[in-house]
Structures are given as C-alpha cells and as structure tokens.
Image (cartoon, coloured by chain):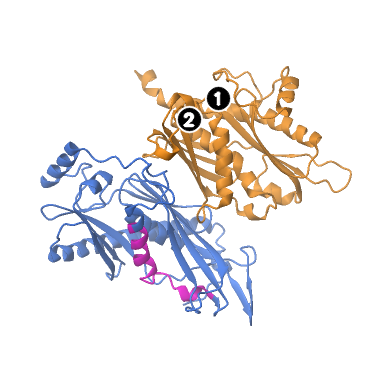
Amino acid sequence: MIEPTVTLTHLHRADGSATYTHNGYSIIGAVNGPIEVQRRDELPEEAAIEVNVRPSIGVGSPRERHQETLLHNTLRSIILTRTLPRALIQITLQVRTLPLEDGTTGVNSSLTLLPHLLHTALLALLSASIPMRTTLTAVLIAQPSSPAKNIVPSLLSPSAHDLVRSKPVRAVHVFAFAGDGRMLLNESDGRFSFEEWNEACRMAEVVCCGEEEEEEEEEEEKDGGGVELEAEGEAMDVDAQAQKESLDLWLRSVVRRKVEGEQRWRRAT
Amino acid sequence: MPREAEISLNEREFIKQALQEQIRLDRRAFDAFRPLELTFGDEYGVADVQLGKTRVIARISVDVTTPLPERKFDGIFQILTEFSPMASPAFEIGRPTDAEVILSRILEKAIRRSNALDTESLCIIAGLKCFALRADVHIIDHDGGLIDASCIAVMAALQHFRRPDVLVEGEKATILSVREREPIPLSILHQPLCVTFSYFEGEIFLVDANLAEEQVRQGEVILTMNKHGEVCQIAKYGGATINPLALLNCTNVALQKVKEMSTFIQKRLEEDAKQRDAGGLMAELSAENAR
C-alpha cells in the first residue's frame, strides 16, 4: 500500500490545516476552533462541530451533505467536546483533485472519498490542537465479483484505476477504527454476506490498527456488536507495539515528524 | 458566525502614520506586488496562485448543454466564487459577504463581459448543443488582494485549459475523449488582469494591499486592463473622493503591472507546456486549427 503524503499547518489564517494526497485524491482541510458559536447552534454543555465538505467542481449537493453528516457523527465521538462547552469547532474540507477515472468506477463515489475525508479532517484537527479522545484511521475495501467458482481477493484501499480494472465490483466497505482498535464507522454498499463483511472487517482492522494477536477474537466480537462510542479511550501510546505497516503507524510518523520540527529550537539551544 | 476581527485603533493609527512617512509595514514600495507564485495541476485547467499569504485555486471544467434560446450561437461561461470558512471564519457558506459579492461582480465584468473568452467557439450545433464552461474559484487562504489573485488564477486556468474535440456530422455531434484526440485550447481574445489600488488620505495609492491595509483604507479603485493598455472596467468602492488626475496616473501604473503579470503567466504556461511535451509529440498530436 502506498502511504498518503501530508503537509501540515500550511495555511496562515486557519487554526489548523492539512493537505492530504493519496491515490490521486487531494484534499485541503482547515480547522478553526474553538471559536464563537452562533446562538442557534450553541450547546450548553459541549462544543458544536460544523463540517463543510466542498467539491472541486460546483457547489455542494445532497451527496456532500451526506458525507458531512457521516463525518460529523464520527468526529463527534473522538473530539472531547465536553471540554469546550458553548464553542464551535469548524472543519472545512476542500476537495482539490479527484482521480481521472473517478466517475467511471461504477461504485459509489462518496464511499471512495470517505476515508480520505476522514484522514484529512483528523490531521487538520491534530494540527489545530483540538483535544481528542483518540486518533482515527480509515480504509476502503472493495470486493470484486468472482465470475466462476474461483475467489477474487478483496482489494485493499484500491485506487480508482484498480476499481476500473476489476469491474464489476460487488461491494465496497469503508471502515474507520479508533487508535485503540474500536470500530468508529462502517459504511457498506453492494451485495455481500455476513462472512464476507466479517472478512473485510478483519482485513481493515489489520491495516488500520496493525497486528494484535491476543485481542483479535475479542475485538471481533465487539465489532460485530455494533459501534461503541461512549467508552473512554486510553491516551495515545507513543511506543507503538505494532510492527507491521499500518495506517496507525503512518499517522504516528506524520505527527512525530511534525512535533520534531516544532521542537527543533529546544534541541538547538 | 464570528465577525472578522477588527483591526485595533493603535494598529490603525500606526499603519496610517507609517504611510504618511512613506513606509509600508512589509517594506514594499507603494507600487509593488507581493511575490507571486503560480503553479498548475496535473490535469488541464487548474491554476494555484499564491500572492504573498493569499492563496487562490481556480478550476475550469466543461460540460455539454443546450445553449440559451436567446443566444443560439454562444456557449455558456460561468464564474463561480463561493467563500468557505477555510479562508476566514467570518465567511459563511450560503450567506455571501460584501467582499464575495464584489469579487464575483468584478470578475464577471472583467473577464466575462470584456469578452476575454470567445464564447462563440464553444458552440457545437447552433441552438442545440454547446459547451458550458465553468470556472470555480476556491479561496484557500486570505490575506487581502483577493480580486487580483482570483483574476490571475481564472485567466491562467483558462489559458491552461484544453477542451475535448468534437466531431460534427449533420445533426450528430460526438465528443472525442482525450485518448481519441488531443484536446484543444480555448480561444482567448485578450487577457484582462485586475490591479487594485487602495486609497489613503493624502493622495496615497497602494498596490496590492494586504488584509491589514485593506481594513484601514478609505477607498479602493479596481482597474482591469489587458497588456495592450485597453481598460476593461474601473470600479471604485468606499466613500472617499478621488482626484481624476490621480486616477489617470493609476492607469499608467496598472498597465505596467499588467504587462509584468502577463509575461509572468506566459512564462509559467510555457514551462508547463515544456514539461508536458516530454517526447516532443505535442505538435503532431495537436488538432488545433490555425486562426
């Protein structure tokens, strides 16, 4: 899997910003917060979150509103909104480029974009130093339909080009996992059995959170039971035990690079 | 939405007094632009302009529709500017601020109504099919000079854009994809560019004011010109009265700036074309007719 490239905190006006590029998708994210909230959106005990997704061409449509809702619900579960009552956290995601084949993949394009939007939002939130319970990683899994008895392996984080080549795609899944391995979001589209979904879920978990031998059985049961949001997550473990290449490690390396850059003055003196 | 943070009284006085002493806070000359940076995306028709800390991305896209019934021989060209909270939390989606209205109005006047783009060349079959071109202007970072930066971005993107070729046989038109035939550039008649002058007390005109200077200024004059010295539009906002002779002087300054910017855009376009023309095949592939 090719790792996404990220530039953090490159905008001057926004409190936090990130540009994320992966598989031909490029998204600019900006976070302002905590800022003053409008009277009608104000929540007395927690921070309001506003997500704006802006397409590269044209103005927002119901598709973007749907993505905004998904992002809003997912991010609300990891941002410590209770620590910032009566404030607003404003997240703007501007899609800059889409891959050329995006319109012709034959799968729901709002799902293929979703993991990238989630990553951009998270990185922008990290850049803005918004208090968060845990981190988040997301991945897209596509299951191409097998013509005969032979089973085609599922595609892990496929690019638009891969999707076009393996047409027709039977089902696509988007999974998002928190830093402690809990599932935060699952969106699936197409025809699939529960076994297939389970397999996709396990595959996504390995990619997102790295290998975890003992807990695997336990995790699976939890995931089957649905989304668990309210549990308190542990603080981020800086010494990652997972050795395998995973999105979690990638996220850590991005943040580490950023922190190292910012702490340069300390080591220089 | 929170309002834009107003500049403090002390800062305001400081900037004003410095200007009276012929000093700008960033040590620029009164008629100097901030460093301009222009990059093009991998695909055709995306221009990313950075003017100091201001950053604007323009993106051109094309579609096929039926032309307007009263303009059967013309294609459709639209410029869309919508501010997002990315540039400043004071910008709200769906509720345009004054700056947004002014920006879209000026771009409309400067580019669309000055006939920078030959819309007749976008017509495929008169009255039935035409290309609808749209330019989306995304404001990514806001530090003043939005009008100048947006105008540069849109003009550069238009010159960079290539539309797909069409094959017309009687009433039937076929759009040829990029793989079938090399897309062709738009026919651009001239290149209008905007220069904004900020007016301060004592006949001081600043070129390319940043956000702090914009908040202090008493008036602004937006001049649009092409490199041949033809004035496309003049707009003046703000209450201060301006001497007509000073305005004439502004046009001279604007002409010089527009010439510089045009050559800069041209240079960048040529660099980009050279990069794309890796095997030297562009000349053979081109389906463009000589004008």
Label 2: few (<14), some (14–19) or many (≥20) C-alpha neighbours in 10 Å: many
B76 within the magenta span: no
Q: Amino acid at mark 2?
A: Leu
Q: Earlier in the sequence, mark 1 or mark 2?
A: 2
State whether residue A241 appears in this view.
Answer: yes
The disc label shown at residue B266, or none:
none
The residue located at (53%, 72%) in the rendering is: B288
Same chain, labels 1 and 2 = yes
- Report the span colored magenta: B102-123
Q: What color was chain B assigned in the picture?
A: blue
Q: As shown in the figure, which amino acid type bears the numbered disc 1?
A: Thr
Element at label 2: helix
Location of mark 1 (residue): A134
- The image quarter containing residue B130 is bottom right
Q: Which chain is orange?
A: A
Q: Residue tagged by mark 2?
A: A126
Q: Is residue A132 left or right of residue B27?
A: right
User: Is residue A233 placed above or below A62 in the rendered structure?
Assistant: above
In the foreground, B85 or B153: B85
Picture residue at 64% right of the left edge, 30% below the top: A208
Q: Position of residue A237 (x, y in %)?
A: 56, 18
Give the image location of residue B271, x and y in percent. Answer: 44, 56
Query: In terms of depth relative to the viewer, which is nearer, B36 or A96?
Result: A96
From the image, which quarter does the N terminus of chain A lie in?
top right
Name the subunit of mark 2.
A
Residue A59 horizontal/vertical position (percent): 50, 54
Q: Would you place residue B95 above or below residue B191 in this image?
A: above
